[in-house]
Image: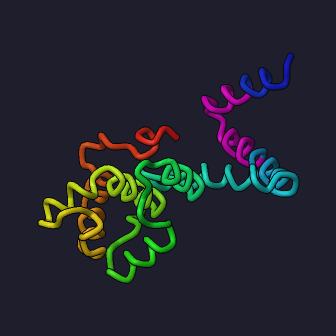
Amino acid sequence: MEVMQKFNELYEKIKYSKKENALCVILSTFVEVMEETYKTNPNLFKKMVEKMESFEWKQYLSHDEAQRIVQSMNPPAKWGYHPLMKQLETMKLDVEEPGVFNSCALYAVMSMIYSDDANTLARIMDFENANQTPDDKMLEAIHALAFNKLKDKDERFNVRKYFEV
């Protein structure tokens, strides 16, 4: 029997098992594999840890995912991750909401809003365009809109589905 087929078969048995030790078996095996992966392939280990981290959030992106998303935007986003987070903290605006969204998801959504809607927002705020709008005004508006998307009570917006990651 092929090893992958055997793995899938065992995984299905453990997943639906009523035995108390089933979860311990899979988790201890997983820990061993992760320890070996850490030694032999640190980049893969990092990706796996980032995937695991997502269970803590309804809206989650890893830093690498957010960077790839933002770098592909046209027109380009105005801010890099670290400068944006620093500016938001200076303005005393939340960058995460535990269990709801992480800062990388916020960064990607704020960048999307800026890329797609900055000039429209500027006109709503009585400025000719985004370049003439004071950064703090633009950031407050985009931050509020990003919060609305990430905390959507209907849960229609999903950052991972929207950006196809």
- Residue 9 placement, left or right of 40: left
What range of the chain is rendered magenta? Answer: 10-28
Up/down of 157 relative to 115, above or below = above
The kind of secondary structure the magenta stretch mainly shows is helix
- Say whether residue 2 is visible: yes
Is 83 rendered above or below residue 14?
A: below
Q: Is 27 situated left or right of 159 in this image? A: right
Provide residue 46's location: percent of width, then percent of height: 70, 56
Residue at the outermost top position: 1
Residue at image position (40%, 69%) is 95
Task: Identify which residue is drawn at 13% across, 60% down.
Answer: 124
Residue 22 in magenta stretch: yes
Q: In which quarter of the image is the N terminus?
A: top right
Q: Where is residue 28 in the image (x, y as percent from the top left)?
A: 76, 49
Residue 37 highlighted magenta (yes or no):
no
Q: Relative to the observer, which residue lies in front, 165 or 20?
A: 165
Is residue 158 left or right of 130 when viewed as pictured?
right
Residue 102 in the image: state x and y as whole percent: 45, 61
Q: Position of residue 10 (x, y in %)?
A: 74, 27
In this view, 159 is above or below 120: above
**Whether residue 99 is visible:** no
Viewer-proximal residue among 18 and 25: 25
Q: Quadrant of residue 3?
A: top right
